[in-house]
Amino acid sequence: MSKIRIALIEDHDLTRVGIRTALLQKTEIEIVGEATTAAEGLKMLKTVQPDIAIVDIGLPDKDGIELTKELKSITETEELNTKVLILTLQDNKESVLAAFAAGADSYCMKDINYDNLLEAVRVTYNGYAWIDPAIARIVLQQAQQNPNKLAVSSYTKTFANSLESEENQQSIEPYALTDRELEVLQLIVEGCSNALIAERLYITIGTVKTHVRNILNKLSADDRTQAAVRALRSGIVG
């Protein structure tokens, strides 16, 4: 089985080393290059042509959004099919929409846990978008408010298809979820990790995982992001 070839473009050494160490726990992943600036990163990407570039949005010489835009313009003219997974501390509307307008394929927060990062890599590699639930809220609102202005990229095409399929879902009855599950769902929509949910609600991480599993089952959702989208569209959380 071919490995998922990943390049890291991140200027903070500890963060980059941490991501590398985490991903290399899986034999299916290979780190083929690293860079600390956008200029070095673009040169490196042209040379190694990875499957996925994990790009920090806050690079010192040029932000990751501009780097993504340049990479995607190269993709259109050369045989380069690198997908971009943005990794950032920024979840504001402007940064999120600008990243997807530039052609980003997935968008993760830097406090993402290892299991979700690995899932994000696999999902992105398979040609789909992976987003934090909090980011789903931003793009969903943009799609609802300005459906004709949402940038066309591999991400937004996938997201648009997701929205269209959600229209055909049966409405979700709020009483199907317990009060505690609604609390957990609200925090999922806000982009909280299991650890943060446990801290906020004064429960164990194991209990949070049980609630999340029950929520996914009751909403017929495959993952947290899909659960968040369905909850937002149905209005059971705000």
Image (cartoon, helix red, strand yellow):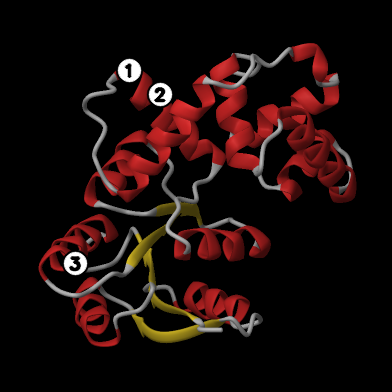
CA gap, disc 2 and disc 3: 29 Å
| Residue topped by disc 3 | 75
Relative placement, left or right, of 202 versus 75 is right
Residue of label 2? 141
The amino acid on which the numbered mark 1 sits, given as a three-letter code, is Gln
**How far apart are the alpha carbons under marks 1 and 3?**
30 Å
Q: Secondary structure at mark 3?
A: helix
Q: Which residue is depicted at the point 23% across and 50% down?
A: 102
User: Could you tell me residue 129's position as x and y percent?
Assistant: 45, 50
Q: Would residue 44 appear left or right of 198 to someone viewing this image? A: left
User: In front: 133, or 217?
Assistant: 217
CA neighbours of label 1 inside 10 A, class few (<14), some (14 to 19), many (20+): few
- Label 1: state its secondary structure: helix
- Which badge, 2 or 3, comes first in the chain's sequence? 3
Name the mark nearer the viewer: 2 or 3: 3
Quadrant in the rendering for residue 83: bottom left
Q: For residue 191, say whether it is visible.
A: no
Amino acid on which the number 2 mark rests in the picture:
Gln
Residue placed at 46% from the left, 60% from the top?
A: 124
Q: Amino acid at mark 3?
A: Thr
Percent of width and height locating residue 209: 82, 46
Q: Vertical placement of 202 versus 20: above or below?
A: above
* Residue that protrudes farthest toward the left in the picture: 77
Q: Quadrant of the C terminus?
A: top right
Q: Nearer the viewer, mark 1 or mark 3?
A: 3
**Along the viewing direction, whichever of 107 and 150 lies nearer the viewer:** 150
Dots 1, 2 in contact, CB < 8 A? yes
SS at mark 2 in the image: helix
* Sequence-first tag of 1 and 3: 3
Q: Residue at x 49, y 47 (%)?
A: 131
Q: Which residue is mark 1?
A: 145
